């Protein structure tokens, strides 16, 4: 899973009771249900609880992959599940993870590779669900000059955001490709 939901700390209970009663568990359940066709009807069958205030910080400005979250708000799924959801625009995965680690957001969307690095650096984070199952990044070339393998990238310039998750993955990809395709 590439984009994940993250929060800090260790839940007291990982079992079904945690998922049914905590705000974190409720939003994880709500998002999963909102993403699965036909399962959305199950939200109305959940017991009514007092609305939990929950602040979600996006990893970036609202984009297509955020649509299920906004759709759930528009349709009232979070409200029906007892969640008073506030959504804030993001400015990248690192700031989103820092916001949740500092307690300035309850839950965030973040890139998985960046989250792994943050956990390795000592951030106390928990992944609870994912929206994108495959990285949408790609390398595109002109049909008249096709790039068919990593070796074909030699001598070309790649435009990529420095220090982004994509740049980190590209570095790892190119190193792996070089080690499996020696000259």
Image: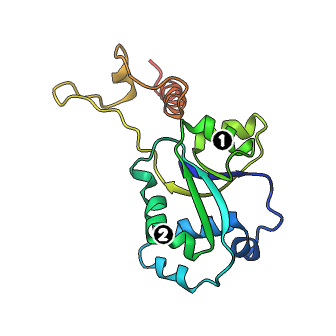
Residue 17, placed above or below residue 133: below
* Residue 154 numbered mark, or none: none
Question: Which is nearer the eye, 161 or 153?
Answer: 161
Q: Quadrant of residue 14?
A: bottom right
Q: Which residue is mark 2?
A: 34
Judged from this view, the residue extending furthest toward the right is 12
Location of the C terminus by quadrant is top left
Q: Position of residue 5 (x, y in %)?
A: 61, 53
Circle 2 residues within 10 Å: few <14, some 14–19, many ≥20: many
Question: Which is nearer the eye, 128 or 138?
Answer: 128
Q: Which residue is mark 1?
A: 97
Residue 42, placed above or below residue 84: below
Judged from this view, the residue extending furthest toward the left is 144
Q: Position of residue 139 (x, y in %)?
A: 35, 32
The answer to whether 99 appears left or right of 180 in the picture is: right
Q: Position of residue 113 (x, y in %)?
A: 59, 40
Q: Earlier in the sequence, mark 2 or mark 1?
A: 2
Residue 12, placed above or below residue 60: below
The answer to whether 111 appears left or right of 106 in the picture is: left
Question: Which is nearer the eye, 20 or 136?
Answer: 20
Q: Quadrant of residue 129?
A: bottom right
Give the residue drawn at x 54%, y 65%. 31
Q: Quadrant of residue 157?
A: top left
The answer to whether 170 appears left or right of 106 in the picture is: left
Residue 59, placed above or below residue 30: above
The answer to whether 163 appears left or right of 37 in the picture is: right
Assess whether mark 1 and mark 2 are in contact (beta carbons under 8 angstroms). Answer: no
């Amino acid at each position: 899973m590439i984009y994940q939901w993250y929060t800090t700390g260790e839940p007291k209970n990982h079992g079904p009771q945690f998922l049914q009663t905590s705000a974190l568990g409720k939003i994880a359940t709500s998002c999963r249900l909102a993403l699965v066709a036909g399962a959305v009807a199950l939200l109305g069958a959940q017991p009514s609880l007092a609305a939990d205030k929950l602040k979600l910080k996006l990893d970036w400005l609202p984009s297509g992959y955020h649509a299920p979250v906004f759709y759930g708000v528009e349709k009232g799924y979070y409200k029906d599940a007892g969640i008073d959801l506030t959504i804030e625009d993001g400015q990248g995965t690192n700031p989103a993870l820092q916001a949740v680690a500092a307690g300035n957001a309850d839950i965030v969307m973040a890139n998985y590779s960046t989250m792994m690095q943050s956990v390795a650096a000592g951030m106390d984070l928990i992944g609870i669900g994912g929206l994108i199952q495959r990285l949408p990044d790609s390398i595109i070339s002109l049909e008249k000059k096709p790039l068919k393998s990593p070796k074909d990238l030699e001598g070309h310039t790649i435009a990529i955001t420095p220090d982004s998750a994509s740049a980190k993955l590209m570095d790892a990809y190119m190193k792996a490709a070089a080690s499996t395709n020696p000259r």
